[in-house]
Amino acid sequence: MNDMGEDRVIEIEGLYTRFGSHEIHQDISLSVYRGEVLTLVGGSGSGKTTLLRQMLGLETPVQGNIKIFGYSRYDCNLELLRSLRNRSGVLFQQGALFSALTVYDNIALPMRELHCLDDEMIRDLVMLKLDMVDVDPQHANKRPAELSGGMIKRVALARALALDPELLFLDEPTAGLDPGLSESFVELIQTLRQELTLTIVMVTHDLDTLAAISSRIAVLADQRLVGLGQLQEIIRIDHPFIKDFFLGERGRNALRHLVPPS
Amino acid sequence: MSANRLSEEISPWYQLSTSNGASSIKLTGHYTLIALDQELLKVASRLKYFATQSELHWDLTNIQQMDHAGAVLIWRAWGKQYPSRLSIRPDQEKLFVHLEKAHPAPKSERRDLLWPVLTLGRRFFLFWDHLLGIITLSGQVLLDILYLIRHPRQIPFREISANLFRTGAQALGITALVGFLIGIVLSYLTSEQLHTFGADVFIINILGMSIIRELGPMLAAILVAGRSGSSMTAQLGVMRVTEELDALTVMGIPHSLRLVLPKIIALGIAMPLVVLWTSAVALLGGILAADLQIGLNFNYALSSLPDAVPVANLWIGLGKGVVCGMTIALIACHFGLRIKPNTESLGEGTTNSVVTSITAVILIDAIFAVVFSNVGLKIPR
């Protein structure tokens, strides 16, 4: 591993994205450091999810470069790309569990694809992952269609963590969960962060989640990165979107310990 | 003895040493899935071997990084219990605590000894269920038709015309191609045989009878079952997956009236037309081939066709078209509405729909053959 990329897990330089004539991103530069939780926020259509998909290598920007673990996404060979993929895990918004496979097989799939683990070890690892995300072993033989929304998120998180990734992407981790469930999901992510050395990139609209686990926040608005820093720094930035998002009624409620009542 | 044998080993993953008669093993490096990679099973078997030494002192404090895979590897080597002499960091201990209380994997269900009987029974009930479902759906469609007769303003003309275009107009290309080729093949094979008997003229009878009464309707029906039947099933299935069917229900729009009925009516109208088209193109292909092969005059062939084939055969062919078309649409909709919201069910449902409708089409053909065995077969003198 090179020393340059040691503390920067993701580096984005001068990123431009366009869909047809519609400009999504203009000159975005951003770094994610090892061990931190970076939250991407922005209004609908501000390109948060697009940026996340570009980091995952699912979409390609018009211009600019994205480096993961110090390697560029766009000029590396297949083997390197595969190992980069194995070092990162993704929790998709809807879980994206394979509906044809049981919970057990969903989590075992990435392990089997490595071809270097035997069945016994895979079984122990899967049960360990299920235990970590608080899913009862009796659900292991169920299909995703038989699970509740909260359970699907947990199983999807277990699958994202299957290969013990260093980097975890969360797309709206608490969307569609009730407040109690989303709180316990946030707690779960925090526990996992303590036990495993994880770097997390998260997209969320949920201010409670954001306030609870972010180390830094990146705000996307008007095609640009309008704010980057800790929550206290962000809420002092004078920008209509930030004022609206963090200092509106809902924002004040979630951040009441940070924002003095007006 | 064995302690002596162990005393020398050093590898990137562990250092085995002996001092004052006590042997100890120091694990080093990165015990992570990425780092271990292809070495994993080798390291695992070595560690398992070392763990057979009960007096060995395990030192895990020099491991730079350990993840779940690494922890499971070591835990399994120990035989799922802590060794008697162990040095460990608190952060590593946390991982092992999880392993210690981890549940065993639940066993998947075992096959019963009676499984052939059970499978057969289940198949039978499934068949019965499908049969009931199809009968219920057709009854529902009939009720909808009665309702529409009383409320003609609610007839879904838009959907019917869209389905007509999709299942009829867009199927013209493929049915023409297949019909033309089959016509050529049929004519090519029979004309040579007839020529040996000097019965060249009867090629018209053979082509006309077989294509108009049998091949045209069957080719069209099988092609449409594969083409339109599968797309209908998949469309309804995806609507189930995306909850569009539920959205229609809560809006008070019945599935059968808005989705099933237009498809059945449209295919009932489109199918006889497609049959006519397929038969015509197949006849054209057959006559052209006969023209080239045995020099049959094209104009003569056309003018003698009405004498060779009684017109009742055309009506039977078109009748088959109507019945097959409506059956295909009914079966496709039945399977489409039963699809559960997952990808596997979607694929299974589409396959079942096509297989069932092709079987049904051939059954209908057989029934027509038996019922109309006295109609249109005798050539008027």
Image (tube, rainbow, N blue to C red):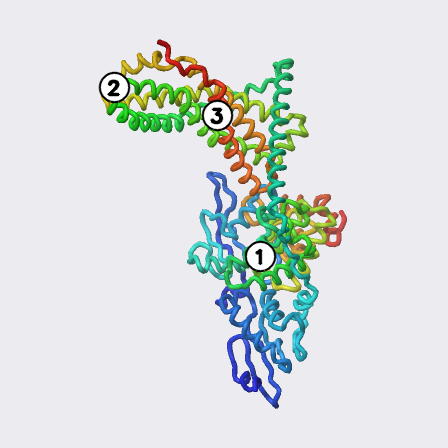
Circle 2 SS class: loop
Q: In the displayed structure, does residue A199 sit left or right of residue B325? A: right
User: What residue would you read off at disc 1?
Assistant: A108
Answer above or below: position of A223 versus A113: above
Q: Residue A182: where, in percent of width, then height?
A: 70, 50
**Outermost residue toward the front?**
B197
> Which mark, residue A185?
none
Same subunit, tags 3 and 2 = yes
3D distance between C-alphas at marks 1 and 2 = 68 Å
Residue at image location 31% in from the left, 12% down from the top: B303
> Can residue A237 be seen?
no
Q: Earlier in the sequence, mark 3 or mark 2?
A: 2
**Residue topped by disc 3:** B366
Q: Amino acid at mark 3?
A: Ala
Tell me the crowding category of disc 3: few under 14, some 14 to 19, or many 20 or more residues within 10 angstroms, Cα based: few
Residue B306 located left or right of residue B345: left
